[in-house]
Image (spheres, coloured by chain):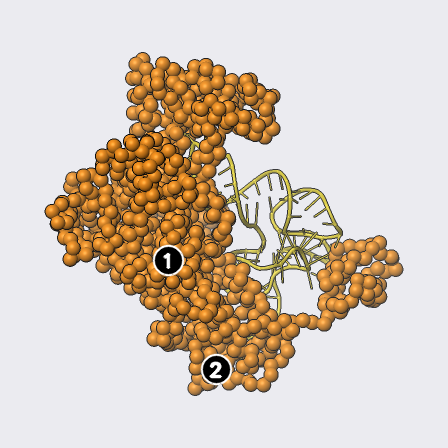
Amino acid sequence: MKYFHNEIEEKWQKYWAKNQTFKTYNTSDKPKYYVLDMFPYPSGAGLHVGHPLGYIASDIYARYKRHKGFNVLHPQGYDSFGLPAEQYAIQTGQHPAKTTEVNIATYRKQLDRIGFSFDWSRELRTSSPDFYKYTQWFFTELFNAYYCNIDNKAVPIKELIKELERHGNKKVNSPCNEDTPQITASNWKNFSEIEKQTFLLKYRMTYLSETTVNWCAELGTVLANDEIVNGVSERGGHPVIQKKMKQWSMRITAYAQRLLDDLETIDWPQPIKDIQTNWIGRSQGAHLQFNIQHSTFNIAVFTTRPDTIFGVSFITLAPEHELVSKITTLAQKKEVETYIKSTLKRSERDRMSDVKTVSGCFTGAYAEHPFTKKPIPIYIGDYVLASYGTGAVMAVPCGDQRDYDFAKYFNIEIPNIFEGIDISEQAFEGKGNTKITNSDFLTGLPYKKAFKTVIYELEKQGIGYQKINYRLRDAVFSRQRYWGEPFPVYYKNGMPQMIAKKHLPILLPKVENYLPTSDGKPPLGNANTWAWDSKRCSVVNVQLVDGKTVFSLELNTMPGWAGSSWYFNRYMDAHNSKDFAAAEALNYWQDVDLYIGGSEHATGHLLYARFWQKFLYDLQLVPKKEFAKKLINQGMILGESAFVYRLVYTGQFISKNIFKKILSNQNLTLKEEELKSSNWNDSLKGLMYQSIHIDVSFINTSNELDIEIFKKSRKEYNNAVFILEDNKYIVGREVEKMSKSKYNVVNPDLICKEYGADALRLFEMFLGPLEQSKPWKTAGISGVYSFLKKLWRLYNIDENGIVQVREDSPSKASLKTLHKTIQKVEDDISNFSFNTSVSTFMIAVNELTQQKCNHRKILEPLLILLSPYAPHITEELWSKLGHITSISTVTYPIFDASYLVESNKTYPISFNGKMRFTLDLSLDLSKEEIEKAVMTDERTQKQLDGRTPKKVIVIPGKIVNIVG
RNA sequence: GCUCAAGUGGCGGAAUUGGUAGACGCGCUGGAUUCAAAAUCCAGUUCUUUCGGGAGUGUGGGUUCGAUUCCCGCCUUGAGUACCA
């Protein structure tokens, strides 16, 4: 009987759905294990073969853990708020909820077809009100909390108010709000309500502030730093400019140190840890002040090299620095204004692309050196960033190349403070043991000592202190979009107010138009009616009528990472309507044991989710500081794009190898039949050509183009002329990211139809190491497919579908094959090398076929072993073996080492390191006995040919080497 | 520029704490079966060779009886990051 994968897979998928085989309960005697995938955004394009790679790996692991006796939570859901659905809505008027619904249905169908063991009863969607109700609630919790530097954690804002009433803010300022002015208790008491609220905003974990944001005009919204790549938007590649706007921000900087420290407690890939460490960008240095001559102002700077303080010869401010306008002298005013204007014009991108050009301008003002009291000229320059440190630097040209270049350009002196270092060509940026010189009380000290000494001196004089600075910035949380979570916020006298938990969720209102309003408000400004908790309130024209008062609502929505920052906790108790999850559920599941997803989220989702979790932990809402113990980044599956080459001049399509010859202009000998076109020779004059992406389904496995299909694919190709090689048109191939626009997408549905889901699963694992990126080549699937067919044949299934297995004892060789396989596969799974375990199965089936082994005692454990990889065929064969229960419920076979232990060990015998022959020796022999046995062997004597060896090296259990 | 990772047949990739490099699969070659094809099965497949061997894991060194594996220099590729004071 043939292996009909389609029939089998349909049967078992139905069975699993009907019996809720993979439903998980929150109570069990078994230990828990939580396996999670990064949930997908349901795009209109559906899944391609690259998407399920991580899901397959996690599914194998989840099934394996179930076999190992764990109560496994393996859920799936959708990150269903997002830009594409909204842009589609703008174009078509179709409501994003509708498109999302349709896309999810497609995704679900595709996922089901691959045979995942997800517990779909826990499915969640970030765009569902049941879910975003809690996203909104967490927002209000963030608003109602501040970061306490005494407890070093977030605590309710009530505590801060109490403290302010008693002592003012003398003690409470944590590093993330150290710039907040100091107030006393009586100051606080004299504040008006609005002043109090304004003041508290400086402390809240989420706060409203006028900030410089990354504005993308094309997308009509602000973007977070991690959403910008090379100065353009990550999505769409549109230009991004700096703009001041009133925005919600998340005070993630409060957690900078803890986010850094706790990286050591989690088993995440080193590259991800490195990226996050880099992104947080901790640097240790000093904060110090320079008084400005003839004024009351002073300039605060941050430096990592306070030891070079005596090398300062000027100060540079960012053009946006607030002091610029205040200190510029009348004489320099015009020049400064012109310069600032020119820097505003330069986009971020320009500034980055020409890093080397020095530009700046003198303000006319002078600061005073804190120790020597010498005047120091103050410049502005756009190499200083307003958003890092204090937006001002003390320039030490001899110790920093950028300062050096600036000094050379403006002819500023470059004092040398490094003993025995030549700085005539470039700055000296090293530290090491070089001693500081020409530096008053620091002269003669090496870096470390000088660093400590100068900080001591600064603190003593009260002009500076040691400081740790972070590159990490607070994350902008407002988006001027429609398809996102509405904020649970209304405004009273211009101050934001939270809407109480009992009124949540604030439902996303219906709008006719998804674009910003004519007066520049975000799309939610188009809503006529808002509704939540309809019994209590009603909202008309974006105005909340609550009894008599009229308030306006927040019209921004939350960014894409809001829901994904906590969704993993929701799966633990997905349908709870009273809370985001019951305490019992949270305490049972604790955290994610294994998280699988792409590394592209390193500075986005993976950082925000860690921040959010820590916040929830501080409020004792979740039991763990980190949400995921182990993380694995699956690599990307790349597509092999196909190209045809067209000469622009003649319009001819030229087969790949002929085209290559033309390009290299070598050995250009064309057969007469290739020269069908009379224009041919002309075309060589100006070699203008296009390489055009064509759909990968137009070509066969030997890269030959199906010309007829190609011609029909587009009108413009109907009469295309082809120059062939060996009567074929060969296309060019190139590995690229899989994408619709490159026509290189391979749909998993087609693979499932042709080869089956089990073959797809095995093949995706077989492609290579999980973490690596690798190109997809459909041709390669035949290997695993024929493996499945061989497995099927091993079971001797007759025409009636009856399996004929032998019940007597299998041979020693077969048992050895089985137990070798058990051991190897378990080793591989625990190392997450799924690729090599697939090979192990293939070897096992080949060996068993050769041994003609179809013993029940071998076949049953083999099925259990294989079932995580190929669940459908193993379920089918299991049922044919006469079992009633599903294979998912049985436990993994236990490896019995006794089948592998051999009395003899084969020793390689080498001469001068070169292996000559092998000798079977007992494992129990002593070194001396082994040596004796080797030396008396006739092959040894033959090799030695009468000579005496210098020494004989015996490594018991490994090798014998004879050195002559 | 800085940080990290990786270089093994025609290709994807194996190789435990250093111990017979190239497992497994694709592709290719030959054979069996077939009227033929598909499918299936068997054999071969790193290079080189005067058929004894010899060379070989990017490259040059080092440690070792022995190195794909450990150490140092260089080259190449990929990823991340980018005026961070």
Same chain for labels 2 and 1? Say yes or no. Answer: yes
Viewer-closest of A109 and A166: A166
Name the residue located 54 percent from the left edge and 73 percent from the top edge.
A893
Of circles 2 and 1, the one toward us is 1
Judging by the rendered image, the residue that carries numbered circle 2 is A881
Amino acid type at mark 2: Leu
Q: Residue furthest left?
A: A548
Identify the mark nearer the N-term, 2 or 1. Answer: 1
Q: At which x and y percent is residue A563?
A: 32, 53
Which dot marks residue A277?
none
Rendered residue at 38%/62% (across/down)? A584
Specify the quadrant of the image occupied by residue A102: bottom left
Q: Position of residue A56 (x, y in %)?
A: 43, 63
Residue at 43% from the left image edge and 69% from the top image edge: A28
Q: Is residue A359 visible?
A: no
Say which colour chain A has: orange
The image position of residue A838, as x and y in percent, is 52, 66
Chain yellow in the figure, letter:
B
Quadrant including the C terminus of chain A = bottom right
For the residue pair A639 and A407, the one nearer the viewer reads as A407
- Residue depicted at x 59% and y 30%: A432
Q: Secondary structure at mark 1?
A: helix
The quadrant in which the N terminus of chain A is found is bottom left
- Looking at the picture, which amino acid does disc 1 mark? Asn
Residue highlighted by disc 1: A569
Q: Is residue B19 above or below residue A817?
A: above
User: In the displayed structure, would residue A125 be above or below residue A161?
Assistant: below
